[in-house]
Image (spheres, helix red, strand yellow):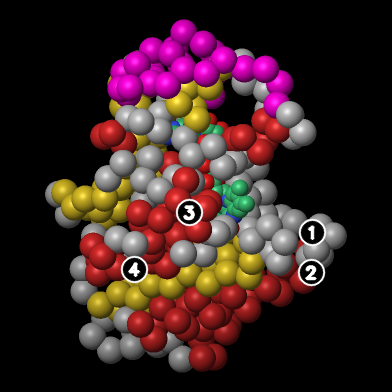
């Protein structure tokens, strides 16, 4: 299909982009275009103006500052997948990036675009939740920080307000012994997550789990923290029985999606199986 007609402006600076958004209420940011353009072609959205932020140089970076990892919103999936720094200090991010689409999608698509899109089957939200990230949004009125737990509101809906641009993702660097893993059952046609589970565990000296953060995507209208699973892991020695028991709570309190590919019952089962696998993998890597 062909999209409805629209105007296009390439912003050269963040200020220019923010001004354009402030002047055009229904304008949309264009990042990698790998979710927005398909949605426009299907006429699910018909923005009158696209503000292209792809050429704004200071939105694409991976760096360390003040004990945090800071990632610019326009950083591509591939840049994260191939970052040696992230492999060392936060391997969950490159691992998650490697699960997204194919090479073309990873070369163009951005972490900021994916988070702002909040696709219920997108991979990044699970990892960002498990890492308790903070998301920095900027508008003409200034800057604010949104916790990942508060960012994903519903299907394709985030806490970003009109006129705001997601500028940066911040993740506290972990101390001590930690283990991380992302596992996913991809939809065989689209590659999106039928179920994706990110696990971020920290340990005391032995095998006792000090804290656990589990993010799950693909299962419901938005990605979520599996708090009931986390509760079953914290303070426990993570043997197979403990992990299986905790993982059996992967969809507690969650309205599970069902569709022609995976019924709600099947998805619930997959969430438990993939939660178990992610936790075991994270434990074994710690
Ligand atoms: C064939 C194919 C396969 C894919 N497979 C997967 C997959 O397996 N897993 C997965 O997670 N994703 C997958 N994707 C989606 C892909 O990851 C997209 O790149 C991503 O979802 C959107 O990023 P983008 O940079 O392309 O954003 P765009 O498409 O440009 O924008 C998406 C939305 O976010 C808004 N936006 C973008 N950047 C910002 C910002 N900085 N601040 C505020 N709003 C912003 C836009 O206005 C738009 O509403 C796939 C896409 C395709 C085409």
Q: Is mark 1 within 8 Å of ligand 1?
A: no
Quadrant of ligand 1 in image: top right
Q: Which of the 4 quarters of the picture holds residue 1?
A: top right
Q: Which residue is mark 3?
A: 106
Closer to the camera in the image, 179 or 21: 21
In front of the other: label 1 or label 3?
A: 3
Rendered view: 136 above or below 179: above
SS at mark 3 in the image: helix
Magenta span of residues = 3-28
Of callouts 2 and 4, the N-terminal one: 4
Measure the alpha-carbon separation of dots 2 and 1. 8 Å
Instruction: Rate crowding at label 1 as few (under 14), some (14 to 19) or many (20 or more) other CA atoms within 10 Å.
Output: some
In front of the other: label 1 or label 4?
A: 4
In front of the other: label 4 or label 3?
A: 3
Q: Is mark 3 within 8 Å of ligand 1?
A: yes
In percent of width and height, residue 281 lies at 45, 81
Measure the alpha-carbon separation of dots 2 and 4. 32 Å
From the image, which quarter does the C terminus lie in? bottom left
Q: Give me the residue at 21% from left, 74% from top.
A: 176
In percent of width and height, residue 82 lies at 34, 62
Of callouts 1 and 4, the N-terminal one: 4
């Amino acid at each position: 299909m062909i999209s409805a007609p629209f105007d296009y402006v390439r912003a050269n600076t963040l200020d220019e982009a923010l001004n354009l958004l402030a002047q055009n209420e229904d304008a949309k940011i264009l990042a990698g275009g790998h979710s927005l353009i398909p949605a426009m072609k299907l006429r699910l959205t018909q923005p009158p103006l696209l503000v292209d932020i792809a050429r704004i140089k200071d939105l694409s970076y991976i760096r360390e500052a003040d004990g945090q990892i800071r990632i610019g919103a326009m950083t591509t999936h591939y840049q994260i997948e191939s970052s040696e720094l992230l492999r060392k200090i936060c391997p969950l991010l490159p691992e998650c990036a490697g699960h997204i689409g194919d090479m073309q999608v990873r070369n163009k698509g951005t972490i900021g675009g994916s988070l702002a899109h909040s696709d219920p089957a997108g991979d990044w939200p699970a990892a960002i939740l498990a890492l308790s990230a903070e998301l920095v949004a900027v508008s003409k009125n200034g800057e604010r920080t949104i916790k990942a737990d508060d960012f994903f509101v519903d299907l394709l809906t985030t806490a970003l307000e009109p006129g705001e641009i997601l500028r940066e993702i911040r993740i506290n660097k972990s101390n001590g012994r930690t283990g991380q893993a992302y596992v996913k059952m991809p939809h065989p046609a689209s590659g999106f997550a039928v179920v994706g589970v990110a696990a971020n565990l920290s340990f005391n000296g032995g095998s006792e789990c000090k804290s656990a953060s589990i993010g799950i995507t693909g299962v419901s209208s938005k990605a979520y923290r599996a708090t009931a699973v986390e509760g079953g892991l914290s303070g426990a020695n993570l043997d197979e029985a403990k992990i299986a028991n905790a993982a059996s709570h992967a969809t507690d309190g969650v309205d599970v999606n069902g569709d022609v590919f995976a019924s709600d019952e099947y998805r619930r089962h997959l969430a438990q199986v993939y939660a178990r696998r992610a936790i075991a993998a994270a434990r074994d890597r710690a």
